[in-house]
Amino acid sequence: MPSFVPYLDRCWLPCLISHVYIGCGPKNRSRSISVFIGSVENWSVGDPAEIPNIYGFNYDFNKSDFYTVMLPYINGKAPPGAITLQDADLHRQIKKPVTHIFSTSNMVSYESFVDSTMAFFFGRLDELYTRSDLRFRGLAGMRYGFLDAGKDVDNIIRDLEMHFDKVSLTGQMPWIDTHLQIGPLLSRLFKQLDSPITTFQFTRMAERQALQKRPHEKSGMHNRDLLSRFMEVQTKDPAIITWIATNIGAGSDTIAIILRAIFYNLLKQPHSLQKLRKELENAAQAGSVSDPITWNECQKLPYLDACVKEAERVHPAVGLPLERVVPPGGSKICGQYLKGGTIVGINAWVVHQDKASQRKKMEQALFTFGAGSRVCDGKTFSHLIIYKLVPSILQAYDIELSNPQAEWRDEGRWFVIQKDFNVLLKKRALT
C-alpha cells in the first residue's frame, strides 16, 4: 500500500462530507489519499515512520483550521481550549505549568476518586449503565449524577455526540464557522444551544471558588482532585482555564469507546477472555492484587496490558486524521516534498493496520492518543480508569454477549462510537 496516493479532483469535497455525514465505519477508511479542498492540498499519511516527523517535539507543524470549529459555544462565545490551540509554541507555554498534574507518578493520588466511583458503579450495575461519571469524579471530586439518576444528566452525553458530529462536518470546511460565524449566531438565536458541558465547567469552578472564600466550609472540598490542582495553578497563570473543558469533553468519550472495544473483543474471543481471567486469578492467589486493584498492581499484569493496547489498536477512538500544517519552508514526507501550508494528517485507523512484526514497533506506532508534543494530556489518567475498571469488572461479574452471533455497528465521524453492544451480567460467587 502506498504511503499516500494523490487525488486531485475538487469534486471530492462533497463526497468527503457525505462520507463523514453518514458515519461510515472504519472498514471503509482503510486507504490513505490526498485531496485538494479549495486551494489547500490535504494529505492523509499512512506510514507510521512519519509519526515523529509530523507530530514530534520540534513544534514545527501547527494544527490546521479543523480545530477552530471544535470548541462548544456559550453565550455566543467559544471559551478557549487546550486541544484546539493551533500555535504549537503557545501550547507549549501554557502546558508547562500543568505537566506535573498529568504525570504518571501523580496517578496514585487520583485513585481514591476512581475507587469510590467504581464501588458505587458496581452497586448499580445490574440496573444502570453510564460512561462519564468516572471522568467527572476525577475532575471535580464528585459524581455528577449519571449513576445516581440512571440517565443522561443535563443531556451532556447527547450534547457531546451532537457537538462532535457537527465538528466532523464543519471541520471539512472550517471557513463556515470562521467567516459565517454559525456557532455564535445560533447561540444568540437559540439560548438552549449553550453547551451543557461548558455550563458544567463554569458551574463547578464557581462553586469551588465560592467554597474557597468560606474557609469554615472547606471540609467538604477535595483539594487534590484535578479541578483544585488546575485552579491552584490558575492563580499564577490565568490561561490554565483552557485545560478544564478539554478534560471533561474529550475524556469521557475516549474512555467509553476504549472500554467497549476491550470487552467486545474479549467476548468475541473467549480464549483471550479466559487467559485474562487466569492472569487475574493467579495474581489474586499470589496476593499480588488488592480489592480494589491498585494502579501499581495493574502495571504488573502483562496480558491485561496487551488486551488494552490491542483494543486501542483495532478500535481507536478518533476516526479522522489529526490534521497539521506543513511549516513555511516545506517538508519531505514519505520521500515526497510538500510545500508550506499543505495540510497533512495521520489517521489511527490507517496507521494501526501497518503490519509491524515486533511489539516495540507496534507500540511506537500506537496513535490512539496522538503522539509527540500534542499527545493527549489525559492519556495516563484515562489509562488509570481503564486499567483499574477492566479487571475489577471481570473479578466481580461473569459477562457474556446477549447475542453471540450479532455484530455491533459503529458510527465513524470524529469519534467512532459503537452501537448495539449488549451483554448479560451475573454476579460471580466469592472464592
Image (cartoon, rainbow, N blue to C red):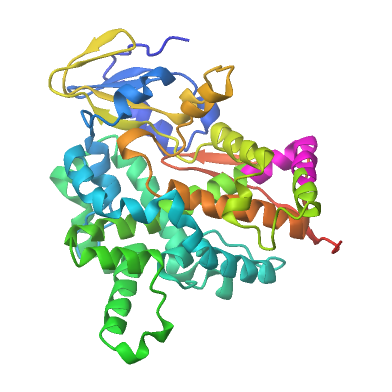
Q: Is residue 197 above or below residue 207?
A: above
Q: Is residue 382 above or below residue 237?
A: above
Residue at point 43% right, 21% down? 48
Residue 215, x across and y down, in percent: 30, 88
For the residue pair 14 and 278, the one nearer the viewer reads as 278
Which quarter of the rendered picture does the C terminus lie within?
Answer: bottom right
Whether residue 27 is in magenta: the answer is: no
Residue 320, x across and y down, in percent: 40, 34
For the residue pair 216 and 402, the one nearer the viewer reads as 216
Residue 136: name its quadrant.
bottom left
Residue 76, x across and y down, in percent: 19, 61
Q: Please give left or right for residue 327 compared with residue 301 in the image.
A: left
Dominant SS of magenta comes to helix
Query: Taking the image as drawn, is residue 402 in sight?
Result: no
Query: Taking the image as drawn, is residue 184 in sight?
Result: yes
> Bounds of the magenta span?
262-278
Whether residue 272 is in magenta: the answer is: yes
Q: Please give left or right for residue 387 compared with residue 375 in the image.
A: right
Q: Is residue 194 above or below residue 213?
A: above
Q: Residue furthest bottom?
A: 216
For the residue pair 106 and 240, the one nearer the viewer reads as 106
Residue 304, x across and y down, in percent: 66, 42
Q: What is the number of callouts on the image? A: 0
Residue at point 36% right, 56% down? 101
Q: Please give left or right for residue 232 compared with residue 299 in the image.
A: left
